[in-house]
Amino acid sequence: MSNSLPHWPFILRGQPERERENAHTPIRRRGQVLAKARKQCLRILPNDWRLLLWEEETKEAILFTDGPMQIRLVPAGCFAQTCVKGDINRACATALARLSKYVGGDNQRSVTLAAERPLLLQKVLGLWQFSVRLSAVNDIRVAPEPRAKKVRIIVQGPALWAVTTWRGRLTEQSALRAETAIIGAIARSRRWFACGPSMVRIDAAGSLLPFVGGFEIALPVSTQGSLNDGYIHNTECSPSNRRMDQPSLPVS
């Protein structure tokens, strides 16, 4: 959705050139005011509505489909990341507040950054780890340093992920059930094997439709023929069936 109003064509006669150039200024200012008001409205709503501030979505290539499961090639990128303890939904609200502040200008350069959905979530050493991709940052060395100590910048290379959608409200129990389902789907494919901990991908605010919402569950995968088939072979990939509630290393 555009943050500015359309500039309708019109003709100005008998005015100096500078006045003609400035004729669009009130419209631009009105668009900026509307964009600012929109952001302010979102900030007073439930924290998970902050997802709506990130209008872009990560461009992923679908390489293989088996029923509801898709094998996707996810591009490399830089991410803002934070860890939160406690209930999964309260943790999500806290993480969104931290990450949206960082991309909204709460960094050492005071610059606003573009971010992409989905919001990524893993359980790591008893904490909920949330990450959001920074759209225009391809090199971690040029990413603005966070002011908040609980936010860090990481880089992730391209990787293959098995992804499926799970209907219903996000809870720790529903995430575990979704993980069990996708592990079974991968096993039935007889081509791919899981090679790391699962990840929840959140694309919409759960408070919008709390009882009929949904999320994606994803597992990093590899295959014996990945190199010969031209697919990217996930680094240090070995078969794994670890569940979300077991200790695992961060994705970075």
Image (tube, rainbow, N blue to C red):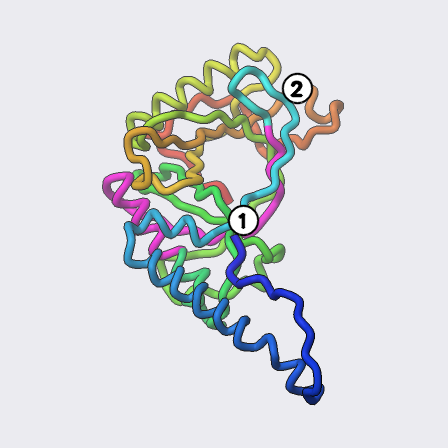
**Judging from the image, what secondary structure is the residue with disc 2 in?**
loop
Q: Check disc 1 and report the residue beneath it.
A: 56
Residue 105 shown left or right of residue 48 in the figure: right
Crowd class of label 2 (few under 14; some 14 to 19; many from 20; radius 10 Å): few
- The segment highlighted magenta reads 72-99
Q: State which tag comes first along the sequence, 1 or 2.
A: 1
- Whether 87 is among the magenta residues is yes
Q: Check disc 2 and report the residue beneath it.
A: 224
> Label 2 amino acid?
Gln
Image coords of residue 110 (percent x, y): 46, 72
- Whether 59 is among the magenta residues is no
On screen, residue 78 above or below 222? below
Seen from this angle, which residue lies furthest front?
13
**Judging from the image, what secondary structure is the residue with disc 1 in?**
strand
Residue that appears at 44% across and 44% down: 119
Which residue occupies the foreground of this view, 116 or 81? 116
Tell me which corner region of the image, top left, top right, bottom left or bottom right, holds residue 193: top right
Image coords of residue 194 (percent x, y): 52, 23
